Amino acid sequence: MRRNYFSFVVVGSVALAAAVNAFAQEGDFTTPDKVRIFYKIEGSGPETLVIVHGGPGNSLESIRPDLGPLAKGRRVIYYDQRGNGRSELIKDANKLGYEQHVADLEALRQHFKLEKMTLLGNSWGGLLVSLYAVAHPDRVERMILHNPAPPMRGFLTDMTDEIAARMESLYTKEKRDRYRFVAAASNWVKAKDPVAICREFGKLVLTVYTRSRTLDDSFKGDTCSGPAEAVRFQQVVNNLVWLSLGDFNLVPKLSVVKAPVLIIHGAADVIPQRGSEFWSAGYPNGRLLLIQNSGHMSHTETPDIFFPAVVTFLNGTFPPDAKKIERPGGIELVK
């Protein structure tokens, strides 16, 4: 009896371990240009959601801890973009352009044998999944742009101006000077403790990204996660990715994407609302959900609105308050 009981316990333990692993797995895949990409899986179910983090230069841990509810009843795949987090550290500028990021996302799709992908892109990730969709429109099932970076270069200047204005009203001159120091990529590269300078930078900038101008305990994401050497080059990666985009305007190219696209935008975001209106106008089946009481981090600032809206969309329909923007005024859709 003891032997049988022991066998039962062993088998049961193996089964339990397998069940746990089904909800939390991690590993690597290799891109066509031989770069190692780290991924992490949460949840299980018949549907798969691929979540693309922001930055550029952050890791999946910047968003994963706050999006746990999306893993209920579905498999959620996160990955660290090249040169970030636990993926391969890259110092060759020619391997850190947006084209490589698009190719990495396609390599992920092939690795997991997904015919089509359902994608959620956060901040810069919203622009990245859109770049992917334009390149591979037949490989996209549906997409969520979560407080996305704008679809054209000009709005980035508006964003920078808004950040500066908020810092002017919130911080002393000494603190603003300190922000300029910790924002400089060269100071990260030569820092004795790159994680410390990253955390200082993150607190200063993320505070002004919120509607309340406070970074409270509701935000669990870690924008400084990963090996110290990866953190050291976060700002370098960020600069190189944006440089690779040049004077971009993605709006005229969006018409090739027929998949439904939900754009979520916090009304108090530092990113101009008109950027998200252009996303909605450019996508043939795109709709904008504007959240009034939210800044850039609507998943933590207004989770009672964000998560039901995302789940509704993942289940096949747009949330009722998502609206089609036919044509924003002031800027032509065609450059």
Image (tube, rainbow, N blue to C red):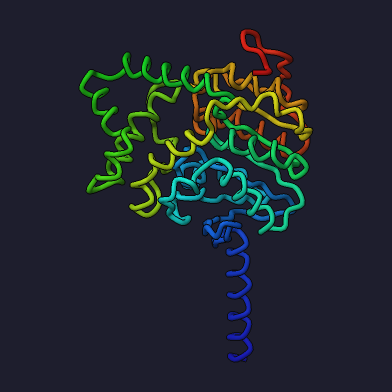
Residue nearest the viewer, comparing 11 with 152: 152
In the displayed structure, 318 sits above or below 52; it is above
Q: Which of the 4 image quadrants contains residue 134?
A: top right
Quarter of the image with the N terminus is bottom right
Q: Residue at x 62, y 8 (%)?
A: 330
Q: Position of residue 302 (x, y in %)?
A: 54, 28
Tell which of 74 and 117 is nearer to you: 117
Give residue 130's quadrant in the image. top right
**Count of numbered marks:** 0
**Taking 119 as reference, is 85 above or below it?**
below
Q: Which percent across, then down, holds residue 300? A: 50, 33
- Residue for point 52% across, 23% down: 294
Say left or right for 156 vs 310.
Answer: left
The front one of 182 and 43 is 182
Residue 162, image x and y in percent?
Answer: 43, 17
Instruction: Give residue 209's quadrant in the image.
Output: top left
For the point 22% across and 48% down, the residue is 192
Which residue, as the protein is rendered here, is positioned at the far top? 330
Residue 5 position (above or below residue 80): below
Which image quarter holds the C terminus?
A: top right
Residue lying at the far front in this picture: please name it.
94
In the rendered view, tell whether residue 278 sits above or below residue 58. Answer: above
Please name the residue shown 66% across and 41% down the image. Answer: 119
Image coordinates of residue 268 in percent, x first then y, are 50, 18
